[in-house]
Image (cartoon, helix red, strand yellow):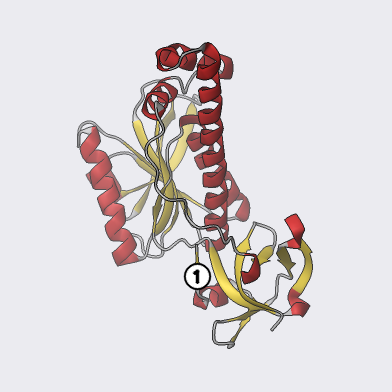
């Protein structure tokens, strides 16, 4: 077989294969001691997240100036750490897109808003995450979400793109006034989440464009605030398949290490069994990888 044990990802337009010979051979770096002054940088970076780029840099220099012998050393350290933050954000974005694109069955964009009349903020986060954990294991829910605070009132929200095969509670249509947009709006609230957590919005995802818009919404917050994504359910980055030569459109990438595949390529499992042409149903049966 021309290409064995390939990792396959979907970039939103095409299936792309990475043959096993081109997998990264780099070993995970050994754990090293904490970078000096990294904690001070992280604290100052979080405090200055709302500032424009230049003002943020000036703020970081002021906060870290006593950690180094010269202004140049301070600036060099800030540049290195800022680059690290930027690189990590890019990696999170790539991972998110690959997981979302491979799932392909998202059906709701969900927002849950903290209600101080029901729980304190810490209990709200813990209880919501615990509830989602149970729904993942018992109802096969999947989700990718992020925590965010509203700009004015700083009220905590959880936004997420969800795959919900079995709904709990019921969805009820609610019409109210959007003070931000200054117009009436219609939303769908889940009765179970309303009872236990407060205001929520379950917005149906019907098209690929809805998925793209939802992911952009999540990305906006992780890039703005540096918040980490929350994942629930089995959300692999790749599935694995042997690939036939006739299913390859062309190689691409650095040193042609990747392959663009035809949409209807043949999926072949680890034992050489032909599972069928690529489709959501067939891909579910294929071995997965991260």
- Residue occupying the point 43% across, 16% down: 64
Closer to the camera, 155 or 91? 91
As displayed, is residue 55 above or below residue 33? above
Residue 19 shows in the view: no
Q: Is residue 3 above or below residue 166?
A: below
Give the x, y percent position of residue 190: 33, 49
Query: Is 73 situated left or right of 21 in this image?
Result: left
Where does label 1 land, which residue? 288
Q: Residue furthest front?
A: 69
Identify the secondary structure beneath mark 1.
Answer: strand
* 35 vs 171, nearest the viewer: 35
- The residue depicted at 58 percent of the width and 15 percent of the height is 54
The correct choice, above or below, for 280 with respect to 69 in the image is below
Q: Residue at left 50%, top 41%?
A: 218
In the drawing, does residue 165 fall left or right of residue 51?
left
Q: Tell me where residue 42 appears, x and y as whole percent.
A: 41, 28
- Left or right of 282 on screen, residue 225: left
Q: Residues within 10 Å of mark 1 (few under 14, many from 20)?
A: some
Point out residue 196 in the picture as x, y percentages from the top left corner.
Answer: 23, 45
State whether residue 109 appears in this view.
yes
Q: Nearer the viewer, residue 34 or 122?
A: 34
Residue at position x 20%, y 33% in the image: 120
């Amino acid at each position: 077989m021309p290409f064995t044990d390939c990792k396959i990802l979907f970039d939103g337009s095409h299936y792309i294969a990475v043959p096993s010979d081109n997998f990264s051979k780099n070993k995970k770096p050994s754990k090293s001691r904490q970078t000096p002054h990294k904690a001070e940088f992280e604290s100052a970076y979080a405090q200055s997240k709302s500032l424009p780029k230049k003002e943020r840099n000036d703020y970081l220099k002021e906060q870290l100036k006593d950690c180094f012998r010269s202004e140049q050393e301070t600036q060099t350290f800030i540049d290195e750490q800022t680059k690290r933050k930027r690189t990590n954000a890019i990696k999170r974005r790539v991972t998110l897109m690959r997981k979302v694109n491979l799932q392909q069955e998202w059906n709701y964009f969900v927002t849950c808003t903290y209600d101080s009349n029901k729980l304190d903020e810490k209990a709200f986060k813990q209880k919501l995450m615990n509830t989602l954990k149970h729904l993942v294991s018992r109802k096969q829910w999947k989700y990718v979400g992020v925590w965010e605070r509203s700009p004015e009132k700083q009220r905590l929200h959880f936004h997420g793109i969800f795959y919900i095969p079995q709904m709990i509670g019921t969805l009820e249509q609610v019409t109210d006034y959007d003070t931000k947009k200054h117009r009436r709006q219609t939303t769908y609230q889940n009765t179970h989440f309303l009872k236990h957590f407060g205001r929520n919005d379950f917005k149906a995802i019907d098209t690929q464009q809805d998925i793209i818009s939802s992911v952009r919404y999540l990305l906006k917050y992780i890039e703005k605030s540096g918040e980490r994504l929350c994942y629930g359910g089995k959300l692999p980055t790749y599935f694995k398949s042997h690939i036939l030569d006739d299913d390859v459109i062309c190689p691409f990438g650095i040193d042609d290490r990747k392959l663009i595949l035809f949409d209807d390529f043949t999926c072949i499992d680890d034992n050489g069994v032909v599972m069928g042409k690529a489709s959501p149903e067939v891909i579910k049966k294929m071995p997965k990888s991260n």
